Amino acid sequence: MHETNKNYPATVDSEICISSLNGRTACSGSPLIVKNCTIGDILVGITSYVDIENVCKSDSNGPVVFMRVSYFMDWIEEKTGIKF
């Protein structure tokens, strides 16, 4: 997967736009996880929307837009009472 924000400038700071390189896309609510050997997996995004013609298709290379979790950390901490 690679970041496509440069190709889709309509995305905003709270979004991460990803395009699949291997023909896999994401369904609504799917996680975007970065593997980290030192501290474990990191949730960096949650699927917000996809190209409507490519929703949940296994052969899609269309863009998928995730909400950037770090952008909402203050709100998450406020609502859950959990400090990260």
Image (cartoon, helix red, strand yellow):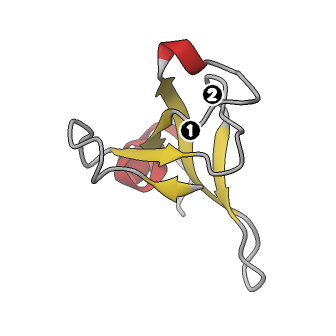
| Residue drawn at (42%, 44%) of the image | 17
List the residue tagged with mark 1.
46
Query: Is 81 situated above or below 55?
Result: below
> Residue 58: where, in percent of width, then height?
76, 29
The residue lying toward the viewer, choosing from 16 and 75, is 16
Question: What is the spatial separation of the Cα atoms under label 1 and label 2, in whole angstroms?
Answer: 6 Å
| Residue drawn at (39%, 50%) of the image | 4
Q: Are marks 1 and 2 in contact (CB under 8 Å)?
A: yes
Q: Is residue 59 visible?
A: yes
Q: Which mark is residue 74?
A: none
The residue lying toward the viewer, choosing from 69 and 63, is 63
Query: Is 46 situated above or below 68?
Result: above
User: As drawn, which residue projects farthest toward the top?
Assistant: 52
Residue 37 quadrant? bottom right
On the picture, is 34 further left or further right than 75? right
Residue 80 quadrant? top right
Which comes before the other along the chain, label 1 or label 2? 2
What quarter of the picture does the N terminus occupy? Answer: bottom right
Identify which amino acid the numbered label 1 is placed on: Ile
Assign a secondary structure to mark 1.
Answer: strand
